[in-house]
Amino acid sequence: MPDDHLRYLPDGLPDVLLDADERTLLQELGGPSLIRFPGRDEPPRAVSVLLHGDEPTGFQALLHVLRSRPELPYDLYVLIGNVRAALEPPGYAVRYLDDQEDLNRIWSPTSRTTPLREAAADALVRLQQAQISSLVDLHNTSGDNPFYAIITRNRPGTINLAALFTTRIVHWELPNGALVEALQDDCTAVAVECGLPGQRATWDLAVDGLRRYLFGPPVDTQETGADHGLLSGLHRVTVPPEVTLRFGGELHDDLDLVIPIDADRHNFAEVAPGHVLGQVHPDAPLPVEVLAPDGRPATEQLLRVDDDRLVLTRAATPVMMTRTVEAVRKDCLVYLAVDPTRPPEASTSSMSMPANRSSSVRSNGTSVRRST
Ligand SMILES: [Zn+2]
């Protein structure tokens, strides 16, 4: 019977399961699973997939690589996260189930209040006891994002590990209860956002990156190797539950906020002060809440209502703008990367720009700042 307690398989997967179709394998596992593929005596490495049930690329790519039966010089730990959500018909359709929480927001060794939290705590303890040297957590994005990796510690090791997949890197400072955050002081841990599921480029990024990670030397933790772009200063923008919203269409009396249907095209491209985030009723209260990287409220510093528009008060780079109300409700609307060294611009409406102003600077990633 499927449930959310952790399964631990210390001897890899039997051939019949490794070769089974994905659904059969997931059904056989029945819940969150930590699988150790025994290798030789180098420091263990880890990969986690499916922390979100609707993000299958990492799982599929990892199966593809493991089916060649590689002989690894280290124990490989594979965490297959929200199996129940992944199995929910028609398959890979929901991030998490109604009776669950987001599996990438509950990583703590001490919080064991639900079966899923218990599974996370058990897996965390096992990964720590195994003294894994590195972990790559593979995700898909729900909006139009270029590939990028997330680090929670800005160190040579995390940069180098991320760069095996992509050189576009986001430094995430907000406490979030994520897996990579829970392991950030134990090993070199990064999350990789492989783009939308079901696309060829997404698949290639995941498979190629996994091969570099699994078959390459241990990651260099002393010196940063790859040139890369690093975005930091992420502010989290959420929509309170009482605010009604939709993507696209006209604002009417039953709605508080309309987000442009293609708002995610600005992901990773800097937008100017006055950039329109959404449409609101004239002079309505701010329909979103913003948290700064240090966890302090920053709504008024970053956004204001200008007549019937919700606009930015300063230049920022949207990251992870979603395109579904479900993702907004279950996580957040967008993150805004703000350069703390740049002063806010004057917040007069004369500086506002029309919503379509930045269509010419579509997300080609040129706005990321170089890191040293
Ligand atoms: Zn995810």
Image (tube, rainbow, N blue to C red):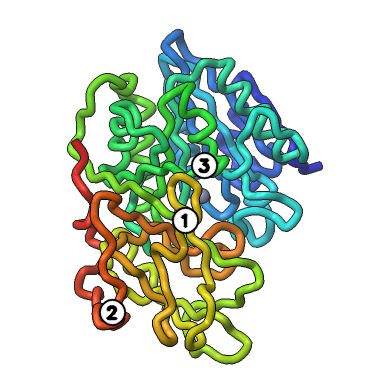
Task: Give the SS element for disc 3.
Answer: loop
Sequence-wise, the earlier of marks 1 and 3 is: 3
Tell me how far mark 2 sits from mark 3, CA to CA.
32 Å
The quadrant of the picture occupied by the C terminus is top left
Q: Amino acid at mark 3?
A: Pro
Frontmost residue, 72 versus 331 = 331
In the image: residue 297, left or right of residue 318: right
- Asked whether disc 2 touches disc 1, contact meaning CB atoms under 8 Å apart, the reply is no
**Residue designated by label 1:** 236
Number of residues whose C-alpha sits closer than 10 Å to that of mark 2, classed few (under 14), some (14–19) or many (20 or more): some
In the image: residue 187, left or right of residue 245: left
Tell me how far mark 2 sits from mark 1, CA to CA.
22 Å
Which of discs 2 and 1 lies nearer the camera? The answer is 2
Frontmost residue, 199 versus 306 = 306
The quadrant of the picture occupied by the N terminus is top right
**Residue designated by label 3:** 175
302 lies above or below 99: below
